[in-house]
Amino acid sequence: MQQSLPFDPTFYFGLVADNLLQNLGPKALVYADEALSKMKAIGDEEGFDLWLAIHEQLAAKAADCFKSEGSVVH
């Protein structure tokens, strides 16, 4: 029997981040911040962790998408 590979959700968080950026542009980060605040306020640790992972992907992708040409990120 073939052994299954461990599940890596990072790929899926990246897909969600891509969709949010495509549909909302830079506002996607604002909405992700609001989702994090809401999850923390209601004590939803699992939801908070999910949105934190999505937020990390959004921040990385937004940094690449929205930086101007010729700029250097340190």
Image: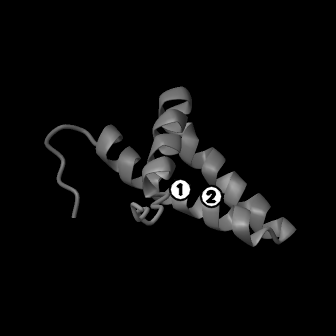
Q: Amino acid at mark 1?
A: His
Q: Nearer the viewer, residue 1 or 53?
A: 1
Q: Residue at x 30, y 45 (%)?
A: 64
Q: CA distance from mark 2 to mark 1?
A: 6 Å
- Callout 2 crowding tier (Cα within 10 Å): few <14, some 14–19, many ≥20: many
Which quadrant of the structure image shows residue 72? bottom left
Q: In the rendered image, which residue does mark 1 sit on?
A: 55
Q: Residue at x 86, y 66 (%)?
A: 42
Mark linked to residue 51: 2
Q: Nearer the viewer, residue 53 or 71?
A: 53
> Is 32 on the left or on the right of 59, as rendered?
right
Q: Residue at x 82, y 72 (%)?
A: 43
Q: Residue at x 47, y 41 (%)?
A: 15
Tell me the quadrant of the picture where the N terminus can be found: bottom left
- Element class at badge 1: helix
Q: Can you give x and y, in whole percent of width and height, for residue 53 in the image?
A: 53, 61
Q: Can you give x and y, in whole percent of width and height, for residue 10 in the image?
A: 45, 57
Q: Amino acid at mark 2?
A: Trp
